[in-house]
Amino acid sequence: LNLQGRALHSLPAELFTLPEVQHLYIADNLLTALPEDLLQLTELTRLDANRNKLRTFPDVLLKMSQLEDLNLGENDFNSLPSDIGKLIKLKKLWLKNLNLTTLPIAVCFLRNLRTLNIHGNSLNGLDDAIVNLGDLTTLDASSNQFTRFPKQICALTTLQRLYVGQLHGNKLKVIPDAIANLTHLTVLAVDNNVLTSLPACIGQLEKLETLHAHRNKLTAIPDEICGLVKLQSLWLHGNAIRKLPKTMDRMVSLQDLRVEGNPLHYPPMSVCQ
């Protein structure tokens, strides 16, 4: 049921006569709270309340343990209840742009989570317990206040998509070699940091299809990256790269290469083939 973008200050009473509703989209409204009447929607598994005016985490949601996909991003609260762990069936949790300074440890025990979006908050680290998210495939931790790359991420070996670009927030200086543990990665975004190099071990991420490292301070890229035969998109624009590896012709799947804004002297002919 789609009630998005209707400038609603409250949810219509008629909604609560539809217990069969499974997906409810109420994003882009003016809601400051969610009513207890939501409990009438006993089949609800997906709730998108993104971009409202919610002042606190809605307590009613803690009673809706059937929820699997919950989007509360871009609201007006900046903390989560410790008993968010009651939502044991959650597979996707979207907490974008809430100015969170901490994540309750309970989030780290939502063992069914596949997607966690914490983009645009004020987190300066991640709890070691995040390793318990053993099925996590997508983590967007971009635009936070990390003082260094959270080492705990490298223990999330099921990850397929990782975003740690820092368009806003503190800039990362180093990507640890332990990134090589994430052998299932297909997408790695480390853009908008102050990286001066990429670890050669990125070349071990054989499933990588997208590598975005634009707007850093890279002066070169390691030859090992040229062995990523599944790589389709490589963004390196806005760095300080003077020369590209001569073996880039090994990247047989590459379709999208961006290198503008670099002081390139001699791009190898292989790039043009």
Image: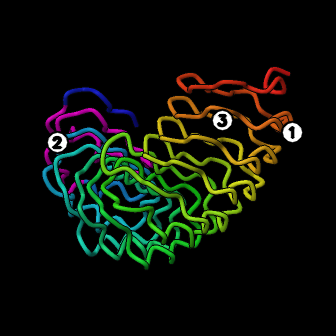
SS category of the residue bearing label 2:
loop
Between the residue at mark 2 and the residue at mark 3, the CA separation in whole angstroms equals: 38 Å
Image coordinates for residue 24, horizontal then vertical, percent: 38, 43
Bounds of the magenta span? 8-37
Q: Number of marks in the image?
A: 3
- Amino acid beneath label 3: Leu
Residue beneath the point at 86% across and 39% down? 250
SS category of the residue bearing label 1:
helix
75 lies above or below 262 = below
Image coordinates for residue 237, horizontal then vertical, percent: 55, 29
Crowding near the residue tagged with mark 2, few <14, some 14–19, many ≥20 C-alpha atoms within 10 Å: some
State left or right for residue 139 relative to residue 19: right
Q: Quadrant of residue 58?
A: bottom left
Image coordinates for residue 107, horizontal then vertical, percent: 38, 70
Mark before the other along the chain sequence, 2 or 1: 2
Q: Nearer the viewer, mark 2 or mark 1?
A: 1
Crowding near the residue tagged with mark 1, few <14, some 14–19, many ≥20 C-alpha atoms within 10 Å: some
Is 11 within the magenta?
yes
The quadrant of the picture occupied by the C terminus is top right
Mark before the other along the chain sequence, 2 or 3: 2
- Amino acid beneath label 2: Lys
- What number is the disc on residue 250? 1
Main SS category, magenta section: loop
- What number is the disc on residue 234? 3
Image coordinates for residue 17, horizontal then vertical, percent: 30, 46
28 lies above or below 221 = above
Residue beneath the point at 43% across and 46% down? 194
Residue beneath the point at 43% across and 45% down? 193
Could you say which is closer to the camera, residue 181 or residue 158? Answer: 181
Which residue in the protein does label 2 denote? 53
State left or right for residue 54 relative to residue 228: left
